[in-house]
Image: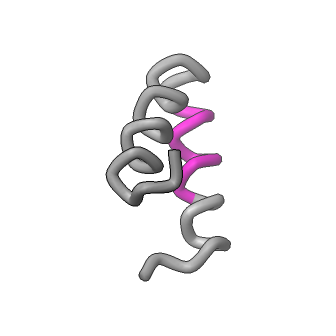
């Protein structure tokens, strides 16, 4: 399982690189696959 800190770091880096819309979509997809949504 990926640690929360690592996940936040990856999210922050992706946010800086791509902006909010694509990162939000990716995050929603990940949460859906993990069954959290």
Q: Position of residue 22 (x, y in %)?
A: 45, 23
The N terminus, quarter of image = bottom left
Residue depicted at 57% across the width and 71% down the height: 6
Compared with residue 17, is residue 27 higher up or lower down, i.e. above or below? Answer: below
Q: Position of residue 12 (x, y in %)?
A: 64, 47
Q: Confirm whether the magenta stretch covers residue 14.
A: yes
Residue depicted at 59% across the width and 35% down the height: 15
Q: Confirm whether the magenta stretch covers residue 6.
A: no
Q: Position of residue 10 (x, y in %)?
A: 53, 56
Residue depicted at 51% across the width and 54% down the height: 36
Task: Please state which of residues 19 and 2 is positioned toward the viewer in this rendering.
Answer: 2
Compared with residue 7, is residue 18 higher up or lower down, i.e. above or below? Answer: above
The residue positioned farthest toward the top in the image shown:
21
Magenta region, main secondary structure = helix
Q: How many marks?
A: 0
Compared with residue 30, is residue 23 higher up or lower down, i.e. above or below? Answer: above
Q: Which residues are magenta?
A: 10-17
Compared with residue 30, is residue 8 higher up or lower down, i.e. above or below? Answer: below
């Amino acid at each position: 399982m990926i640690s929360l800190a690592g996940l936040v770091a990856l999210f922050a880096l992706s946010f800086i690189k791509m902006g909010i819309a694509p990162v939000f979509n990716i995050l929603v997809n990940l949460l859906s696959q993990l069954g959290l949504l």
